[in-house]
Image (cartoon, coloured by chain):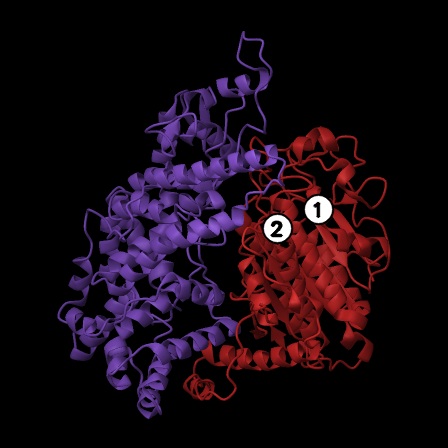
Chain colours: A red, B purple
Amino acid sequence: MNVHVPTRRGLLATAAGFGLSLQVVAVPAMAADPDLARRKVIVVICRGGMDGLAVAPPIGDPDYRALRGILALNDAALPLDATFGLHPSLAATHALAKAGEARIAPAIATPDRARSHFEAQDVLETGAGGVYGATSGWLNRAVDALSAHRKVEALSVGATAPLILRGKAQAASWSPGRAVDAQARLPGLLQDLYRNDPLLGPALARGLATETLAQSAMAAMGPEAPNMTAAPPQPGATPQARQQQGREAARELGRTLAGFMREPAGPQVAALSLDSFDTHANQGAAQGQLAVRLSYLDGVLDGIHTGLGPEWKNTVVLVATEFGRTARVNGTGGTDHGTASTALLLGGALKPGGIIGDWPGLKAQALFEGRDVAPTLDMRGLFKGVLADHMGLDRTVLETVVFPGSAAARPVAALV
Amino acid sequence: MTLADQDLKAAIAVTRFGLGARPGEIATARPDPQGFLLAQIRREGADAAPSNGETSAQRIAALREFQQERRAERAEKTADGQAGETPDPVKMAQNLLRKDTGADFTARVTLAAATVASFRERWALFWANHFTVSATKLATATVVGPFEAEAIRPNVFGRFADLLAAAESHPAMLLYLDQAQSIGPNSQAAEFLQRGRPGSGAQPVARRAFGLNENLAREILELHTVGVDGGYSQTDVTEFARAMTGVSIGGLRDQGQAFGAPVFRAVAHEPGARTIMGVRYAEGGREQSGAILADLARKPETARFVCGKIARHFVADDPPPALVERLTKAWASSNGDLGRVAQALVSAPEAWETPQEKFKTPYEFIVSSYRAAGVRPSGFQKLAPILIALGQKPFSAPSPKGWPDDAASWAAPDAIVKRMQYAQAFTAVATLDRDPKDLAQDALGARLSPDTAKAVARAESRPEGFALLLMSPEFQRR
């Protein structure tokens, strides 16, 4: 009998099939301040409008049950404090929160109010005050600004280039797949053919360099990782088994990212996307389609945490979505496009604390336009707080270059 | 026109407007490149990709019956005291995907690789992407192909209003954007579900949530017609969603013709007049949302938004404003006749003069590689992993916005490495007995650069020469 032992790449290819992709920006550790140079930040974008009230249900809020109806989590939630819990799919995140290494921002939003995925994702990723305010991503501009002080390299992993990393700083990218044949002539011939091509030349060079980094990172992780021997699901596997396999694949993706970041020339800054959070119908509560997506998110975060090992203490992970969803359950067991959602902040570098920003409550008059969680915190304030205090980015650069025109969105203080 | 201009125009006709040159195609287009394209525009629409002939309704019905059978089987097993086997929707979808969707997708790639009218095919692909239905949901996994065949392809050279009406009432769209289950909160159906049948004293019958779902109404405004800056508000979205209630598909209780087919459920329709973007629509049934769609199709914002998108797709990520202006005028003067807009596109000087900087999507790259080699595509088992690795999973656009088609989205470093790996693998197995120099000349004509020609000529083997051609800067672009 053949025993199928998936390779790491195979397992990661599975992750791609589950709609997971990964982008990384590399910033080699060459800063004057060696402590600062070790600091890492990872941005996880949950695309589709993640339901903040499902991520961190305010089970202690007196209006929660009535508004959420069949979506209410109640006893199933993993408790955080008197008001909030976490979705039961977020078990690893919850464990980190109990250790003071994860916090929630339960009423956070970008400046965009149009409830359009595409416009809101643009604003989330460009960091502009409104749509079409910028064509490059704020993480790219942050890397570019860091480059003024030290050599900075950008790397993006994923089949398509995410807006958050597009811009002046050349972002490399990587996604799971088979290894590049180092003996082949073609890469060299193409580099020559691309020498005058401003798009393909730098892209191929960066792609090949990243392949080398990937091979080194994977070798360093070694073959003994327990997930390497996880068998593929048998025919007729239950949805639970499939969900577990998806979570494992997501965890492997997180561990791989962590492996990159632990390499000596590896990235300090990374971004990663998960999609399919647009739950208009049959969203589910403790179980169901959103619960599955959240288990993948938890898997990625768990993988990053365990994979980073001693580097976790130098790391902050931001989890954000383009908008939240309606506070009320809609007519089809789901939720429609809303406004404020929940962001997660994780990392060994965090200062312990309660919720980030104020909780506006769910009373009818407190809802934004009578339907959505009202935003009390500008997303840019959270991003700026992390970039300033954790990554050491200059305040003026933050206000003028990375998030231009955002002076009113004050950086959240004392996060790290 | 100089001879050199004529050569370049022939190459552009086939590679920019079409899906890449098959051997000899540029020579065919050369006497009259513009006429070569104009001749592909025809009232009856795009070509049909061969299929097993099943309609969307049949596919939807088959999926539902299958789900019912699975549920019944499970109930039986549980009654027998055996461990109840949970139906596995993912696996089920995979089986159906392989059989139906895989066949549909492969047929579409095969058509694209072989057609002598590849401008017509690109035009159809543009509209299929504009009205995206994605296989990312189980309910729509098997109907993307039939949706294109039934709603899109016959209408791509007709009036935009007809294409819009066909797309927004098609069962695949109603399922993809959650319209099928949207119920007017004050409709008879809602009352029945809430209180039980009037006068019967029965218990409420609703076993799951019911009511309004505004997903389709929003995306029609934002993505299909006036665009996000088209001047509508949240209230307009909700009002439009109310007007759309009742537009649904036949279910298990509607045995016969209506099963899986579009139906209008008057009992689920929200009563009352609606006001959308300042226009009042009198109380009515199906005709209420029909009138709204017809008005949206006529709006100048729609013409401008969609024509901008056409120019971006065909010519440049940042298209010449004069081109968008021309297309918008052709749209306005013809009352949204898409055949006339297509004619305006291929007649516009800007569409030919703009440098060939459009970066091919993975689908376009793969199709053009088949066309350059003059071979049939491999089966779905090989095709799917290639497109997944390149970031464009078959029939699975990531959102209702469809696939991006700009260079910034597709030219990431990893994507270039993955394209290189594909080119290596493809040219290693494609049995080519032709000289790569000739292949390069056939594929790119006057667009072939001296650098690429030299690199191909110096290759140490046929596969290497062909791989260099496929990965050359000009083959990657159009």
Q: Is residue A335 left or right of residue B240?
A: right
Q: Nearer the viewer, mark 2 or mark 1?
A: 1
Q: Could you tell me residue A347's position as x and y percent?
A: 79, 62
User: Which quarter of the rendering shows the C terminus of chain A?
Assistant: bottom right
> Which residue is denoted by mark 2 in the rendering?
A322
Tag 2: residue type?
Glu
Say if A141 sits above or below B211 in the image. below
Q: Is residue B159 above or below residue B432?
A: above
Please state if B329 lies on the left or on the right of A190 as rendered.
left
Chain holding disc 1: A
Q: Are marks 2 and 1 on the same chain?
A: yes
Find residue A179 and report its horizontal and vertical position in percent. Answer: 54, 78
Question: What chain does mark 2 sit on?
Answer: A
Residue B188 in picture, x, y percent from top left: 49, 17
Give the CA distance from mark 2 to mark 1. 14 Å
Q: In this view, which residue lies farthest toward the left? A: B31
Q: Secondary structure at mark 1?
A: helix
- Residue at image point 69% right, 31% down: A67
Could you say which quadrant of the image residue A37 lies in? bottom right
Q: Quadrant of residue A158?
A: bottom right
Give the residue at mark 1.
A55
Residue A304 visible? The answer is yes
Q: What residue appears at the point 35 percent right and 29 percent down from the top-left corner?
A: B258
Give the mark, 2 or 1, whose residue is nearer the N terminus. Answer: 1
- Residue extending farthest to the top is B199
What residue do we see at 58% from left, 12% from top? Answer: B202
